[in-house]
Image: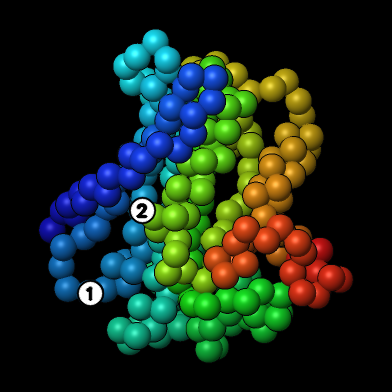
Amino acid sequence: MQPTKAFADGRKDAESNENVAASVEFVLRAALHDSVEADFVHSIAGRIIAEPGSGGEEDAGRIGASLVQFGGALDHGVGTERLGDGISGEIAEYWEHLFDVETGYLKEEIQNEYEVAGLDLLIIDCVELYPRFRGLGIGVSAIHRTIDVFGMGCGLIACKPWPLQFAPSVERDQRALKRLEAPNVGKDEALRKLRSYWSRLGFWPVGDTGIYVLSVSQRGCHARPRDDRGRGLQ
């Protein structure tokens, strides 16, 4: 059976700056059939909309996320050996680095660093803001709004920062590169700046995995987690 689209309208003002108001319109995709592993992974597409002072709406960018209900999967009898790889290949890396594959719970070092209240995971897959709407705080507001709507029942918010201009689907597409108008810097410098951006939002790196996480229970506190040595976060 073909999945249907469930519309979650999140069009609440995200930012007003320099006479530009913005909102985000979410589409959540879910299948209609008996519970299987894939039912616990929900793809979220957010269209970022700007309303300049001149009037009218314009596309300002997009945000993509995945809501992974590890807790619900375990409750419905999905075994740990089927989680991660079994639910979706796209989230296998997060499962491998954050969770204990034997128990299905977060790894001890992750639990020691964060006050985690649940097993569900919200993954911010990508954020793209069109050039004329950058520097207004719209991107940050779209991230926070996505967490507000979909992340409150999760234990962690996670992402793996990577500059879009160096993503395989973009770096060979001249039209996409032209639209992106990315700064003319090398991959290492672009990655350093992007990781710094996410760090300012309160996300911390998990070892050298490239994954950054934010505990929902600690949201708003940008101090480093309890173990200042960052055993799992250096």
Q: Seen from this angle, which residue lies furthest top?
A: 54
Q: Is residue 101 visible?
A: no
Q: Is residue 101 above or below residue 234?
A: below
Q: Quadrant of the C terminus?
A: bottom right
Q: Which residue is mark 2?
A: 43
Q: Name the mark on residue 172.
A: none
Please give the name of the residue rendered at 45% of the width and 48% of the height, measured from the top-left corner: 145
* Earlier sequence position, callout 2 versus callout 1: 1
Q: Position of residue 111 (x, y in %)?
A: 65, 80
Label 1 crowd bin: few (<14), some (14–19), many (20+), radius 10 Å:
few
Label 2 crowd bin: few (<14), some (14–19), many (20+), radius 10 Å:
some
- Which quadrant holds residue 233? bottom right
Please give the name of the residue rendered at 70% of the width and 81% of the height, measured from the top-left corner: 112
| Amino acid at circle 1 | Ser
Q: Is residue 217 above or below residue 28?
A: below
Q: In the displayed structure, does residue 50 sit left or right of residue 107? A: left
Secondary structure state at the residue bearing disc 1? loop
Q: Is residue 215 above or below residue 43?
A: below
Q: Quadrant of the N terminus?
A: bottom left
Q: In the displayed structure, does residue 230 sit left or right of residue 203? A: right
Q: Nearer the viewer, residue 122 or 150?
A: 150
Q: Nearer the viewer, residue 188 or 213?
A: 213
Q: Position of residue 117 (x, y in %)?
A: 52, 78
